[in-house]
Image: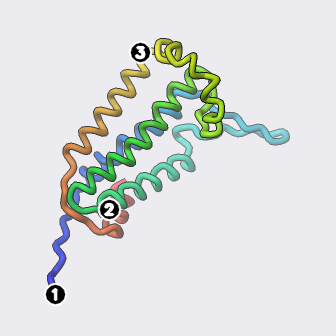
Amino acid sequence: MKSLKRNHFSAWQILSAALPFLAMDWIVRLSSKPIIIEVGNSSSVFSPVYSPAPNLFTLLWIAFFLGITFSARGNGRRILYGFFFGLSYIAFAANLIYYRLTGFYFSFSLLKMADEGSSYVMDVITGTPIYLYAIMAAVLIWGIAVVVSMKTESLSLPLLCSKCFLSS
Protein backbone atom coordinates (compact mmCIF):
# COMPACT_ATOMS: atom_id res chain seq x y z
CA MET A 1 0.00 0.00 0.00
CA LYS A 2 1.33 3.40 -0.95
CA SER A 3 1.74 5.88 1.81
CA LEU A 4 -0.12 9.09 1.29
CA LYS A 5 2.07 12.16 1.20
CA ARG A 6 0.34 15.11 2.73
CA ASN A 7 1.55 18.61 2.12
CA HIS A 8 0.69 21.02 4.86
CA PHE A 9 -0.28 24.56 4.09
CA SER A 10 0.94 27.39 6.23
CA ALA A 11 -1.42 29.55 8.20
CA TRP A 12 -0.49 32.41 5.88
CA GLN A 13 -1.66 30.49 2.80
CA ILE A 14 -4.98 29.64 4.42
CA LEU A 15 -5.40 33.17 5.74
CA SER A 16 -4.61 34.71 2.35
CA ALA A 17 -7.28 32.52 0.76
CA ALA A 18 -9.84 33.44 3.46
CA LEU A 19 -9.26 37.20 3.59
CA PRO A 20 -10.99 38.13 0.30
CA PHE A 21 -14.20 36.43 1.50
CA LEU A 22 -14.00 38.16 4.88
CA ALA A 23 -13.27 41.51 3.22
CA MET A 24 -16.33 41.18 0.96
CA ASP A 25 -18.55 40.52 3.97
CA TRP A 26 -17.14 43.38 6.03
CA ILE A 27 -17.24 45.86 3.15
CA VAL A 28 -20.94 45.16 2.53
CA ARG A 29 -21.77 45.47 6.22
CA LEU A 30 -19.65 48.62 6.67
CA SER A 31 -21.16 50.32 3.63
CA SER A 32 -24.75 49.83 4.78
CA LYS A 33 -26.74 51.45 7.52
CA PRO A 34 -27.36 49.35 10.62
CA ILE A 35 -30.60 47.39 10.55
CA ILE A 36 -32.59 48.15 13.69
CA ILE A 37 -35.08 45.52 14.81
CA GLU A 38 -37.75 46.72 17.19
CA VAL A 39 -39.74 44.19 19.21
CA GLY A 40 -42.09 45.64 21.78
CA ASN A 41 -40.27 48.25 23.85
CA SER A 42 -36.77 47.02 22.99
CA SER A 43 -34.69 47.42 19.87
CA SER A 44 -31.45 45.84 18.73
CA VAL A 45 -28.99 46.46 15.93
CA PHE A 46 -28.61 43.60 13.47
CA SER A 47 -25.34 42.64 11.77
CA PRO A 48 -22.83 45.28 12.83
CA VAL A 49 -19.25 44.36 11.89
CA TYR A 50 -18.20 43.89 15.51
CA SER A 51 -21.10 41.51 16.31
CA PRO A 52 -19.92 37.92 16.87
CA ALA A 53 -22.93 36.14 15.31
CA PRO A 54 -22.54 37.28 11.67
CA ASN A 55 -18.76 37.00 11.92
CA LEU A 56 -18.99 33.44 13.20
CA PHE A 57 -21.41 32.59 10.39
CA THR A 58 -19.03 34.08 7.83
CA LEU A 59 -16.00 32.28 9.30
CA LEU A 60 -17.84 28.94 9.25
CA TRP A 61 -18.80 29.40 5.59
CA ILE A 62 -15.25 30.40 4.73
CA ALA A 63 -13.91 27.30 6.53
CA PHE A 64 -16.44 25.16 4.66
CA PHE A 65 -15.53 26.64 1.25
CA LEU A 66 -11.80 26.42 1.92
CA GLY A 67 -12.15 22.90 3.29
CA ILE A 68 -13.71 21.77 0.04
CA THR A 69 -11.25 23.82 -2.02
CA PHE A 70 -8.06 22.64 -0.34
CA SER A 71 -9.21 19.01 -0.36
CA ALA A 72 -9.20 19.00 -4.16
CA ARG A 73 -6.15 17.83 -6.04
CA GLY A 74 -4.16 19.61 -8.71
CA ASN A 75 -5.87 22.38 -10.62
CA GLY A 76 -9.20 21.37 -9.09
CA ARG A 77 -8.25 23.52 -6.12
CA ARG A 78 -7.92 26.60 -8.30
CA ILE A 79 -11.15 25.83 -10.13
CA LEU A 80 -13.11 25.35 -6.90
CA TYR A 81 -11.66 28.48 -5.31
CA GLY A 82 -12.46 30.45 -8.45
CA PHE A 83 -16.01 29.07 -8.45
CA PHE A 84 -16.65 29.90 -4.78
CA PHE A 85 -14.96 33.28 -5.13
CA GLY A 86 -16.94 34.05 -8.30
CA LEU A 87 -20.29 33.30 -6.65
CA SER A 88 -19.38 35.35 -3.60
CA TYR A 89 -18.05 38.19 -5.75
CA ILE A 90 -21.27 38.39 -7.79
CA ALA A 91 -23.33 38.59 -4.60
CA PHE A 92 -20.88 41.16 -3.19
CA ALA A 93 -21.05 43.41 -6.26
CA ALA A 94 -24.84 43.10 -6.50
CA ASN A 95 -25.28 44.01 -2.85
CA LEU A 96 -22.89 46.96 -3.01
CA ILE A 97 -24.55 48.48 -6.06
CA TYR A 98 -28.14 47.58 -5.21
CA TYR A 99 -27.90 48.79 -1.60
CA ARG A 100 -26.29 52.06 -2.69
CA LEU A 101 -29.16 52.76 -5.09
CA THR A 102 -32.16 51.47 -3.15
CA GLY A 103 -31.23 51.16 0.53
CA PHE A 104 -32.16 47.46 0.45
CA TYR A 105 -30.06 44.34 0.11
CA PHE A 106 -30.36 42.33 -3.08
CA SER A 107 -32.66 39.31 -2.89
CA PHE A 108 -33.28 36.54 -5.40
CA SER A 109 -37.01 37.25 -5.10
CA LEU A 110 -36.29 40.49 -6.97
CA LEU A 111 -35.32 38.53 -10.08
CA LYS A 112 -38.98 38.13 -11.03
CA MET A 113 -39.08 41.92 -11.46
CA ALA A 114 -35.83 42.05 -13.47
CA ASP A 115 -37.59 42.93 -16.70
CA GLU A 116 -39.05 46.08 -15.13
CA GLY A 117 -35.61 47.49 -14.36
CA SER A 118 -33.86 46.51 -17.57
CA SER A 119 -34.30 49.99 -19.04
CA TYR A 120 -32.39 51.49 -16.09
CA VAL A 121 -29.19 49.46 -16.44
CA MET A 122 -27.16 52.32 -17.94
CA ASP A 123 -28.38 54.67 -15.20
CA VAL A 124 -27.26 52.13 -12.60
CA ILE A 125 -23.83 51.80 -14.21
CA THR A 126 -23.30 55.54 -14.54
CA GLY A 127 -24.94 56.36 -11.20
CA THR A 128 -22.75 54.08 -9.12
CA PRO A 129 -19.94 56.01 -7.43
CA ILE A 130 -16.41 55.43 -8.72
CA TYR A 131 -15.14 54.39 -5.29
CA LEU A 132 -17.47 51.36 -5.33
CA TYR A 133 -15.98 50.26 -8.66
CA ALA A 134 -12.49 50.76 -7.18
CA ILE A 135 -13.39 48.61 -4.16
CA MET A 136 -14.88 45.92 -6.39
CA ALA A 137 -11.80 45.96 -8.64
CA ALA A 138 -9.44 45.67 -5.66
CA VAL A 139 -11.34 42.67 -4.26
CA LEU A 140 -11.44 41.04 -7.70
CA ILE A 141 -7.68 41.49 -8.19
CA TRP A 142 -7.11 40.12 -4.70
CA GLY A 143 -9.16 37.00 -5.46
CA ILE A 144 -7.42 36.45 -8.79
CA ALA A 145 -4.03 36.82 -7.08
CA VAL A 146 -5.01 34.09 -4.60
CA VAL A 147 -6.04 31.76 -7.44
CA VAL A 148 -2.79 32.37 -9.33
CA SER A 149 -0.60 31.87 -6.27
CA MET A 150 -2.47 28.82 -4.99
CA LYS A 151 -0.44 25.64 -4.61
CA THR A 152 -1.69 22.44 -6.18
CA GLU A 153 -0.78 19.89 -3.48
CA SER A 154 -3.55 18.06 -1.64
CA LEU A 155 -4.53 18.33 2.01
CA SER A 156 -7.08 16.38 3.98
CA LEU A 157 -10.36 18.09 4.87
CA PRO A 158 -10.21 17.48 8.65
CA LEU A 159 -6.66 18.78 8.86
CA LEU A 160 -7.54 21.89 6.88
CA CYS A 161 -10.63 22.65 9.00
CA SER A 162 -8.62 22.32 12.20
CA LYS A 163 -5.88 24.57 10.76
CA CYS A 164 -8.49 27.18 9.74
CA PHE A 165 -9.97 27.32 13.22
CA LEU A 166 -6.62 27.29 14.99
CA SER A 167 -5.15 30.02 12.81
CA SER A 168 -8.07 32.44 13.21
Q: What type is the residue that disc 2 sits on?
A: Lys
- Residue 156 position in % (x across, y down): 29, 69
At 53% from the left and 32% from the top, the residue drawn is 95
Q: Mark 2, mark 1: which one is toward the viewer?
A: 1
**Residue that badge 1 annotates:** 1
Q: Residue furthest bottom?
A: 1
Q: Nearer the viewer, residue 159 or 136?
A: 136
In the rendered structure, which disc, 2 or 1, sits on the residue that comes first in sequence? 1
Q: Residues within 10 Å of mark 3 (few under 14, many from 20)?
A: few
Q: What type is the residue that disc 3 sits on?
A: Ile
As drawn, the label of residue 163 is 2
**Residue that badge 3 annotates:** 130
The N terminus appears in which quarter of the rendering?
bottom left
- Residue 70 position in % (x across, y down): 29, 59
Q: Dot 1: what SS?
A: loop
In the rendered structure, which disc, 3 or 1, sits on the residue that comes first in sequence? 1
Q: Mark 3, mark 2: which one is toward the viewer?
A: 3
Q: Residues within 10 Å of mark 1 (few under 14, many from 20)?
A: few
At 53% from the left and 34% from the top, the residue drawn is 29
Q: Is residue 58 left or right of residue 141?
A: right
Q: Mark 3, mark 1: which one is toward the viewer?
A: 1
As drawn, the label of residue 129 is none
Q: Is residue 4 left or right of residue 32?
A: left
Q: Residue furthest right?
A: 40
Q: Is residue 92 left or right of residue 156?
A: right
In the rendered structure, which disc, 3 or 2, sits on the residue that comes first in sequence? 3
Whether residue 158 is situated above or below residue 107 in the rendered picture: below
Q: How is the image coloured?
A: rainbow
Q: Dot 3: what SS?
A: helix
Q: Dot 2: what SS?
A: helix
